[in-house]
Amino acid sequence: MRKLLLLTSLMFISSCAYFKSIGVSDIFTSSSEVRSGNTDKVKKVFQLSDKAGKFVVEREKGFNKSKNQFIVKKSVKVSGESKELEKLIVISKLGTLKKSLTVLRPEISEYSVWFEGKKYVSRMEVNPNTKSMEVKLTSPERQWQGKRVFSFPNSTGIFCYFSQITECARATGFIDKAIKRDSGSMKVVIIWEGYPYFQEQYLNIPNAVFTEGTFEYDGKNSRGERRFTLKVGDQAIFYFLDDNRELMKKFWVSQGLSMVELE
């Protein structure tokens, strides 16, 4: 299924119009006042390999100080080509929990994909008044149309977008503390920002917006890389961070997926 969808999918989002609609114009601004390092603008290029082939991933993260928004953007292209296969954006608010713990509060996301030449869109937005996630689906299929509302589950875990997990964990201070102690585990609730289309591309992913899990520190390897594991929905995904605590590698063995930074 994944191979078929990757070969037939084209993901498109009109970034400028979307940013304007949610109040984000100059999406990234430099800031040294809010938890140093994690708010820096960082753009990296990776090679993604899976059963469908090799692809180039452009990933950019940064902080918009005027909007207090932490943003991650990602696009996927076939190696040597300019046409995008995937593109997404997730936006969180920098805040505190119980007046002491710094967190990234999920706010809004958009994921679009083309299946067999037809466009499917999933746009999510948190409704703080009802403590729910509003999901607006647009597609040529009736089953994936209209608005759906999902209540946030009662959980002691930190809510994190799947595509923002390392930045989400870092904002709480967990990554630095775990490295210092050489151990640590953090409870999380993953938000699958690509729901329900994401579940069509990957095998054995929970058919839900929210899934509880853990983000754990595994230690330092001989190359000096710090490894963390996201355990969620019977899946184990390995993340390797560089000395600046930025993502440099990602391995999802059960899906046959690897993503390695290009130098």
Image: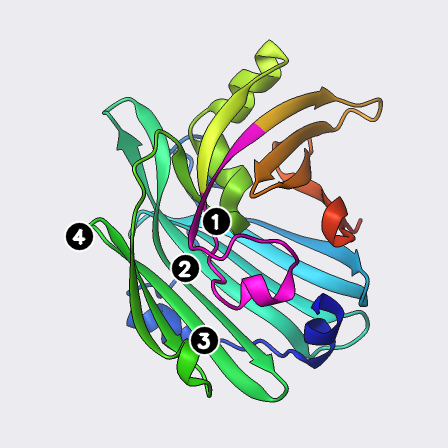
Count neighbours of disc 1 (C-alpha within 10 A) and say few if under 14, some if 14 to 19, many if 20 or more: many
Tag 3 secondary structure: strand
Q: What is the count of numbered marks? A: 4
Q: What separation in Å lies between label 4 and label 2 (alpha carbons)?
A: 27 Å
* Region in magenta: 190-215
Between the residue at mark 3 and the residue at mark 1, the CA separation in whole angstroms equals 24 Å
Q: CA distance from mark 4 to mark 1?
A: 28 Å
Q: Residue at x 38, y 74 (%)?
A: 137
Q: Nearer the viewer, mark 3 or mark 2?
A: 3
Identify the disc placed on residue 130.
4
Q: Quadrant of residue 23?
A: bottom left
Determine whether 46 is above or below 104 in the image: below
Give percent across and percent down for residue 52. 80, 67
Distance in Å between CA atoms under marks 3 and 2? 22 Å
Is there CB contact under 8 Å for labels 3 and 2?
Answer: no
Q: Earlier in the sequence, mark 4 or mark 3?
A: 3
Q: Amino acid at mark 4?
A: Thr
Q: Secondary structure at mark 2?
A: loop
Q: Residues within 10 Å of mark 3 (few under 14, many from 20)?
A: many
Which residue carries the number 1 mark? 62
123 falls in the magenta region: no
**First of labels 4, 1 by sequence position:** 1
Q: Which residue is mark 3?
A: 121
Percent from the top left, x then y, of residue 110? 43, 66
**N-terminal label among 3 and 2:** 2
Could you tell me if residue 254 is visible in this image? yes
User: Which quadrant holds the N terminus?
Assistant: bottom right
Q: Amino acid at mark 1?
A: Gly
- Which residue does the numbered mark 2 point to in the structure image? 27
Q: Is residue 161 left or right of residue 252?
A: left
